Image: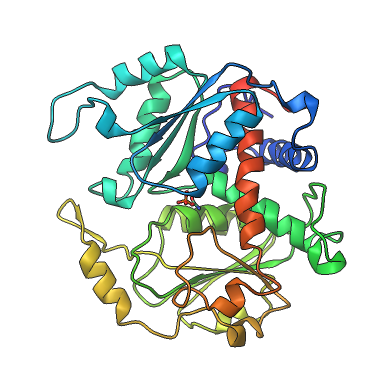
Amino acid sequence: MGKLLNKDFICTQEWEKEELDRVLDLAFRMKQDRFGEKFLNILARKQFFMFFYNPSVRTRQSFEAAATELGAHAQFLEPKAMRLKTAQTAGETVEDAAQVMDRYARGLGIRILEDKVSAYGEGDDLLREYAKWAEMPVISMAHDKFHPCQGMADAMGWIEWLAPKGKLATGSLAKAFDPEALKGKKLLLTWGQGALCRSWCSVQEAILIGSRYGMDVTIAHPKGYSLDPEVLAATKMNCAANQRRFEVTNDPAAGYEGAHVVYSRNWMSPEAYQGGELKKADEIKKAMTITGWTCDAAKMALSDNGIYTHPMPIDRGSEVSDEVASGPRSAIYDVAENRLHAQKAVMAATMAGYLD
Ligand code: CP
């Protein structure tokens, strides 16, 4: 296992499985002993910079709470409050900004989503540029390709429900990390209809981490809504390494059969960027012509007593029915809560080298 102090967290796939295990184990322990003495000062007086190009509910709140609970301070930054060089304007380079930030802070989180870039992958490039110049860890707070902290919270929630001592079996969430809990379980990731043109970051992270933990992965989407081919290849490779199935279907119902975790979410098509611009209105218009892709109770009945998961915010009535989102097998609030615990563990490990 590599050294986690100062390790960037841009995608879970870039971390060794043992590193993910150790951080998830810490996250479970931090959840059980949220204000335990030993965790309170791990980052005492340290700064965590939260650099947001896009708005957020869960991410800002959970990172700010995480910093406070570890004894650190989270500072909110926006590009409009800085004078950064862009394609259109003169200003400070990332090289300079990153190296100055490094003198003040112990960690840097960045969020840059689909509408703040002119082509898929530019946000990922920006994070890696900051990571190149900053010694402190760069943590993705969701960018156009990946959302690793969401992936950790997802895995935590699915384990809490599906472990032998988990909620489906005992009525209460599993309290300890069980790296075997997801092995052989089926994850259905299904496109959800709606007028959102969402980025690929959360869903790509979900299939990567699910396959890493030994899940069968089925992706269901209408024709023309495939995800990043490199991410699909990595997911397929993870499944093959664990002797698990990987499949893609264009049928809105077929993938539910045998599913243990159902994840429905709208996402944009690969044609969303045209001529260096996100054609959001066109994408929405196209998506609105597609029907039959709402996750509802009838489809969930085809699953194997499956749980429902979504990173939120949810487009209720389009991506999923209220009945499912607020139903007895919905894990959405557990997963949302786990953002806090997973991020505390990631920050402790990467900003202080703490794993005890
Ligand atoms: N899941 C998630 O990242 O939520 P926010 O966009 O509200 O931060």
Above or below residue 58? Residue 273 is below
Task: Mark yes or no: residue 163 visible.
Answer: yes
Residue depicted at x 43% and y 11%? 103
Task: Name the residue rendered at 18%, 23% in the picture.
Answer: 91
* Left or right, residue 78 beside residue 317: left
Q: Position of residue 333 (x, y in %)?
A: 63, 59
* Image location of residue 45, percent across then percent down: 58, 16
- Examine the image and state in which quarter residue 125 appears: top left
Q: Nearer the viewer, residue 197 or 130?
A: 197
48 or 300: which is nearer to us? 48
Q: In the rendering, at what x and y percent does residue 153 appear?
A: 62, 49
What residue lies at 70% left-to-right and 24% top-to-bottom?
Answer: 354
Q: Is residue 339 left or right of residue 88?
A: right
Q: Is residue 247 left or right of residue 28?
A: left
> Which quarter of the image is occupied by the C terminus?
top right
Q: How many marks?
A: 0
- Residue 13 vs 95, above or below: the answer is below
Residue sitting farthest toward the bottom: 298
Q: Where 135 falls versus 79 (above or below)?
A: above
Q: Is residue 213 visible?
A: no
Residue closest to the eye, 106 or 162 = 106
Question: Which residue is rendered at x = 77% and y = 63% of the image?
Answer: 162
For the N terminus, which image quadrant? top right
Using the rendered view, name the quadrant where residue 192 is placed. bottom left
Q: Nearer the viewer, residue 215 or 298?
A: 298
What coloring was used for the rendering? rainbow
Toward the top, the furthest residue is: 103
Q: In the rendering, at what x and y percent does residue 330 appear?
A: 65, 68
